[in-house]
């Protein structure tokens, strides 16, 4: 059985990415300028409110929305709109004002989009199956990296199903399997598909673990969602996990963070999230050139008894967006250092911590200080130029050095070595040491200015 088949059996509610759907379904809107009259406006309102009444998780809100839209139409509030796009924008505003629900949305459809499908159901089926294949850059995986100190870092921008199913997720996790701790950065993740959420979450649970549930209005039932066996997940079961969030973290990204926080499987670091906890169902009205996202359920966690809709997720450590990566990285390093007695490993962790602190507190040195380091050091040279110093090897390859302290410098793009200058009792620079992360060093004596 494929990854996708396994995940789909476990988790079937879709969290569609806000903004992603908008970008696709409203493509070409500026060129279309579709003309509408009051008859078409009434058809749109009748069609969408009928679906909202049938599906929306809060029936009283659905009725209120229907009444306001029909009353406004009758009172002539929409007479000023003779093109589809501004009319739908007005409806979209009223949807949010009445429902206060970021997942209850209406979109325009371009002629090009509508011409691709023979029926509303065909459009819906296609869109749900191919949500990620056309839209996500590299399936949402923006960066996978092993940071100094053996900390794994994953910058994930979307949780999207794609034509490659779960292969990209599995490949990324394989690269991180040897790390001592994992950081998953969701600060720019607007959501996506719950199947991918469950798949990624399942890497971090040895035992079958209950994730977030969904109450479904149409069936008046609560569906429980659980982690499930994922191939090659064993290395991750006991790793420390840190999840970074921001205000842009939304929907399925919140689903992942909330489940991990509630189960105490991860430390959440960053900003409070936006608060979109309603799984949705999509509907298309090709003849009217509009589509709907309608929340058909609400999420709730069995441990907390609540969800994140409208309130967002409160991180364990609230840290501003621009500081949250360094904070999470330091937390991961400090925790790993407290767990090991291995001297070389501790040296590597200290190396990484020093690097973070240097970037957080940049050092600026005077021109006179930098010029003192310029000279020849055997087959190596230190060159001063325009208030910077450069390290030059005997093959003439040259690298800029960045100050961490007055005497310690790093290579920004070459993290496995640093240069530390040594002075004699009179303050003269007599050599430099090339330092390595494991604590070893080699000296280069100064031979001439």
Image (cartoon, rainbow, N blue to C red):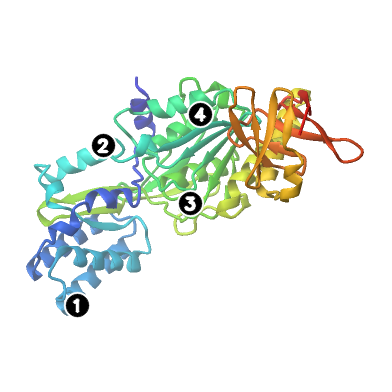
Q: Which mark is residue 77?
A: 1
Q: Which residue is mark 3?
A: 307
Q: CA distance from mark 3 to mark 4?
A: 22 Å
Q: CA distance from mark 2 to mark 4?
A: 24 Å
Please give the label number shown on residue 203.
Answer: 4
Drawn side of residue 108 relative to residue 401, left or right: left
Q: Position of residue 63 (x, y in %)?
A: 26, 66
Q: Is residue 377 above or below residue 14?
A: above
Closest to the camera, between mark 2 and mark 1, is 2
For the N terminus, the image quarter is: top left
Residue sitting at x 37%, y 58%:
102
Secondary element under disc 2, as helix, strand or loop, is: loop
Res. 356 in view: yes
Q: Of marks 3 and 4, which one's residue comes earlier in the chain?
A: 4
Residue 136, position as x, y percentages in the image: 34, 39
Q: Earlier in the sequence, mark 4 or mark 1?
A: 1
Q: Are marks 1 and 3 in contact (CB under 8 Å)?
A: no
Query: Label 2: few (<14), some or many (≥20) within 10 Å?
Result: some
């Amino acid at each position: 059985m494929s990854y996708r088949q396994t995940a789909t059996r476990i988790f079937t509610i879709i969290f569609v990415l806000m903004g992603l759907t908008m970008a696709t379904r409203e493509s070409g809107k500026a060129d279309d300028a579709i003309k509408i009259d009051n008859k078409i406006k009434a058809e749109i309102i009748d069609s969408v409110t009928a679906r909202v009444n049938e599906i929306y998780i809060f029936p009283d809100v659905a009725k209120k929305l229907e009444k306001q839209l029909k009353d406004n139409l009758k009172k002539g509030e929409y007479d000023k709109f003779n093109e589809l796009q501004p009319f739908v924008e007005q409806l979209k505003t009223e949807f949010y004002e009445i429902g206060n629900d970021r997942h209850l949305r209406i979109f325009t459809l371009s002629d090009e989009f509508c011409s691709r499908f023979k029926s509303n159901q065909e459009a819906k089926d296609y869109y749900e199956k191919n949500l990620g294949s056309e839209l996500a850059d590299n399936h949402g995986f923006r960066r996978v990296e092993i940071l100094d100190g053996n900390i794994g870092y994953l910058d994930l921008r979307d949780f999207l199903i794609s034509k490659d199913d779960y292969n990209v997720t599995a490949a990324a996790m394989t690269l991180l399997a040897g790390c001592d701790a994992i950081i998953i950065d969701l600060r720019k993740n607007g959501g996506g598909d719950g199947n991918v959420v469950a798949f990624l979450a399942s890497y971090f649970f040895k035992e079958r673990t209950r994730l977030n549930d969904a109450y479904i209005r149409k069936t008046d039932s609560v569906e429980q969602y659980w982690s499930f066996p994922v191939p090659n997940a064993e290395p991750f079961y006991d790793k420390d996990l840190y999840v970074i969030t921001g205000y842009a973290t939304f929907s399925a990204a919140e689903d992942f963070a909330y489940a991990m926080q509630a189960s105490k499987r991860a430390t959440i670091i960053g900003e409070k999230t936006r608060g979109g906890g309603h799984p949705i169902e999509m509907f298309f009205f090709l003849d009217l050139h509009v589509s709907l996202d309608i929340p058909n359920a609400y999420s709730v966690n069995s441990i907390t008894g609540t969800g994140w809709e409208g309130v967002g997720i409160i991180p364990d450590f609230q840290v501003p967006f621009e500081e949250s990566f360094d904070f999470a990285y330091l937390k991961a390093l400090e925790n790993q250092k407290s767990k090991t007695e291995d001297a070389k490993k501790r040296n590597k962790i200290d190396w990484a911590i020093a690097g973070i602190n240097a970037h957080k507190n940049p050092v600026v040195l005077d021109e006179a200080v930098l010029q003192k380091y310029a000279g020849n050091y055997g087959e190596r040279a230190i060159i001063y130029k325009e208030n910077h110093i450069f390290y030059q090897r005997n093959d003439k390859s040259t690298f800029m050095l960045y100050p961490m302290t007055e005497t310690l410098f790093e290579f920004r793009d070459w993290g496995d070595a640093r240069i530390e200058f040594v002075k004699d009792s009179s303050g003269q620079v007599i050599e430099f040491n090339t330092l390595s992360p494991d604590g070893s060093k080699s000296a280069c004596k100064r031979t001439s200015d």
